Amino acid sequence: METKPMDSVARDLIKLCDAACARKKKYFLSQLHYPMDMDSYWSGGSRDVYHIVDVITKKVARLPSNHPVFEPGRPYTLARPLPENFIVIQTGVFCGKTATPHIYVQDLDQLLEPDEPDETAMAIEALAAAELADSRASDEAYGPVW
Protein backbone atom coordinates (compact mmCIF):
# COMPACT_ATOMS: atom_id res chain seq x y z
CA MET A 1 0.00 0.00 0.00
CA GLU A 2 1.33 3.37 -1.01
CA THR A 3 0.09 6.77 0.21
CA LYS A 4 -0.04 9.32 -2.61
CA PRO A 5 -1.03 12.97 -2.82
CA MET A 6 -4.37 13.47 -4.55
CA ASP A 7 -3.96 14.15 -8.28
CA SER A 8 -6.59 15.04 -10.86
CA VAL A 9 -6.90 11.50 -12.26
CA ALA A 10 -7.52 9.93 -8.85
CA ARG A 11 -9.80 12.80 -7.76
CA ASP A 12 -12.02 12.38 -10.84
CA LEU A 13 -12.34 8.62 -10.29
CA ILE A 14 -13.05 8.97 -6.57
CA LYS A 15 -15.59 11.74 -7.22
CA LEU A 16 -17.61 9.25 -9.27
CA CYS A 17 -18.01 7.15 -6.11
CA ASP A 18 -18.07 9.60 -3.20
CA ALA A 19 -17.75 13.38 -3.47
CA ALA A 20 -16.73 13.73 0.21
CA CYS A 21 -13.76 11.40 -0.24
CA ALA A 22 -12.64 13.32 -3.32
CA ARG A 23 -11.92 16.32 -1.09
CA LYS A 24 -9.21 14.43 0.78
CA LYS A 25 -5.58 15.47 0.20
CA LYS A 26 -4.22 11.90 -0.08
CA TYR A 27 -5.30 8.45 -1.16
CA PHE A 28 -4.00 4.92 -0.82
CA LEU A 29 -2.96 2.95 -3.90
CA SER A 30 -2.60 -0.83 -3.82
CA GLN A 31 -2.45 -3.68 -6.24
CA LEU A 32 -5.47 -5.98 -6.25
CA HIS A 33 -4.97 -9.27 -4.43
CA TYR A 34 -7.13 -12.34 -4.66
CA PRO A 35 -9.21 -13.39 -2.82
CA MET A 36 -10.22 -9.94 -1.54
CA ASP A 37 -12.95 -9.66 1.10
CA MET A 38 -15.20 -6.66 0.50
CA ASP A 39 -17.29 -6.45 3.67
CA SER A 40 -19.50 -3.37 3.76
CA TYR A 41 -21.53 -2.79 6.92
CA TRP A 42 -21.58 -0.44 9.93
CA SER A 43 -19.44 -1.56 12.84
CA GLY A 44 -18.47 0.75 15.69
CA GLY A 45 -18.83 4.02 13.75
CA SER A 46 -16.95 2.79 10.71
CA ARG A 47 -17.99 1.42 7.36
CA ASP A 48 -16.16 0.50 4.18
CA VAL A 49 -18.00 0.96 0.89
CA TYR A 50 -16.66 -0.74 -2.22
CA HIS A 51 -17.18 0.46 -5.78
CA ILE A 52 -16.16 -1.30 -8.99
CA VAL A 53 -15.31 1.32 -11.61
CA ASP A 54 -14.86 0.97 -15.35
CA VAL A 55 -12.06 3.45 -16.04
CA ILE A 56 -12.94 3.86 -19.73
CA THR A 57 -16.73 4.38 -19.56
CA LYS A 58 -16.71 5.85 -16.00
CA LYS A 59 -19.54 3.53 -14.95
CA VAL A 60 -19.70 2.67 -11.25
CA ALA A 61 -21.22 -0.33 -9.49
CA ARG A 62 -21.58 0.10 -5.73
CA LEU A 63 -21.71 -3.07 -3.67
CA PRO A 64 -24.64 -3.08 -1.22
CA SER A 65 -24.35 -3.75 2.50
CA ASN A 66 -23.61 -7.33 3.58
CA HIS A 67 -23.80 -7.59 7.38
CA PRO A 68 -23.07 -11.21 8.41
CA VAL A 69 -25.90 -11.33 11.01
CA PHE A 70 -28.64 -9.11 9.59
CA GLU A 71 -28.01 -9.89 5.92
CA PRO A 72 -26.73 -13.47 5.90
CA GLY A 73 -25.77 -15.19 2.70
CA ARG A 74 -24.36 -12.09 1.00
CA PRO A 75 -20.61 -12.38 1.34
CA TYR A 76 -18.58 -10.40 -1.17
CA THR A 77 -15.25 -11.90 -2.08
CA LEU A 78 -13.39 -10.94 -5.20
CA ALA A 79 -12.07 -14.36 -6.11
CA ARG A 80 -10.79 -13.84 -9.65
CA PRO A 81 -9.26 -10.95 -11.57
CA LEU A 82 -11.42 -8.17 -12.92
CA PRO A 83 -11.25 -7.21 -16.60
CA GLU A 84 -8.30 -5.03 -17.56
CA ASN A 85 -9.98 -1.61 -17.46
CA PHE A 86 -11.70 -2.09 -14.06
CA ILE A 87 -10.53 -0.90 -10.64
CA VAL A 88 -11.93 -1.15 -7.11
CA ILE A 89 -12.32 2.01 -5.01
CA GLN A 90 -12.90 1.73 -1.27
CA THR A 91 -14.53 4.74 0.40
CA GLY A 92 -16.53 5.08 3.58
CA VAL A 93 -16.43 6.35 7.14
CA PHE A 94 -13.76 5.71 9.76
CA CYS A 95 -14.62 6.55 13.38
CA GLY A 96 -17.34 8.95 12.26
CA LYS A 97 -15.19 10.87 9.76
CA THR A 98 -14.77 10.54 6.00
CA ALA A 99 -12.26 7.80 5.34
CA THR A 100 -9.22 8.21 3.12
CA PRO A 101 -10.08 6.59 -0.22
CA HIS A 102 -8.23 3.47 -1.29
CA ILE A 103 -7.79 2.60 -4.96
CA TYR A 104 -7.02 -1.00 -5.91
CA VAL A 105 -5.64 -1.51 -9.41
CA GLN A 106 -4.56 -4.52 -11.49
CA ASP A 107 -1.19 -2.95 -12.25
CA LEU A 108 0.34 -0.09 -10.27
CA ASP A 109 1.00 1.77 -13.54
CA GLN A 110 -2.70 1.63 -14.45
CA LEU A 111 -3.41 5.07 -12.95
CA LEU A 112 -1.09 7.46 -14.69
CA GLU A 113 -0.44 11.06 -13.75
CA PRO A 114 -1.84 13.65 -16.15
CA ASP A 115 0.40 14.29 -19.12
CA GLU A 116 3.14 16.83 -18.66
CA PRO A 117 2.56 20.08 -20.55
CA ASP A 118 4.16 19.96 -23.95
CA GLU A 119 7.18 22.09 -24.83
CA THR A 120 5.17 24.45 -27.05
CA ALA A 121 2.84 25.42 -24.20
CA MET A 122 5.81 25.90 -21.89
CA ALA A 123 7.56 28.10 -24.48
CA ILE A 124 4.45 30.27 -24.90
CA GLU A 125 4.18 30.72 -21.12
CA ALA A 126 7.88 31.66 -20.89
CA LEU A 127 7.50 34.19 -23.72
CA ALA A 128 4.45 35.76 -22.06
CA ALA A 129 6.32 36.01 -18.74
CA ALA A 130 9.32 37.65 -20.46
CA GLU A 131 7.06 40.22 -22.20
CA LEU A 132 5.39 41.00 -18.88
CA ALA A 133 8.79 41.50 -17.22
CA ASP A 134 9.88 43.81 -20.08
CA SER A 135 6.74 45.92 -19.79
CA ARG A 136 7.22 46.28 -16.03
CA ALA A 137 10.87 47.27 -16.51
CA SER A 138 9.91 50.00 -19.01
CA ASP A 139 7.21 51.32 -16.64
CA GLU A 140 9.75 51.57 -13.82
CA ALA A 141 12.24 53.40 -16.06
CA TYR A 142 9.77 56.19 -16.84
CA GLY A 143 8.32 56.47 -13.36
CA PRO A 144 4.70 56.39 -12.31
CA VAL A 145 2.05 57.47 -14.75
CA TRP A 146 -0.45 59.94 -13.25
Image (cartoon, rainbow, N blue to C red):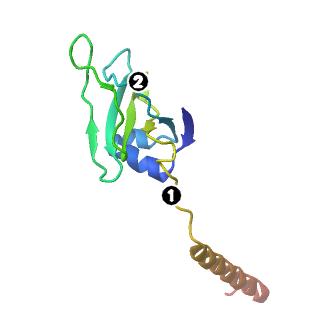
- Measured as percent of width and height from the top left, residue 69 is found at 24, 10
- View extreme (bottom): residue: 142
Which one is in front in this view, the residue at disc 2 or the one at disc 1?
1
Q: Residue at x 45, y 52 (%)?
A: 9
Vertical placement of residue 125 versus 39, above or below: below
Dot 2 or dot 1, earlier in sequence = 2
What residue appears at the point 43 percent right and 21 percent down from the top-left corner?
95
Q: Quadrant of residue 75?
A: top left
Q: Where residue 133 sits: x, y (%)?
A: 71, 79
Q: Secondary structure at mark 1?
A: loop
Q: Which residue is mark 2?
A: 96
Left or right for 120, reference 111: right
Position of residue 71 measured from the top left corner of the image (x, y, whole percent): 20, 16
Q: CA distance from mark 2 to mark 1?
A: 33 Å
Instruction: Please tell me how crowded label 2 is: few (under 14), some (14-19), or many (20+) other residues with Cα within 10 Å.
Output: few
Residue type, numbered disc 1 = Pro
For label 1, the residue is 114
Quadrant of the rendered structure where residue 65 is? top left
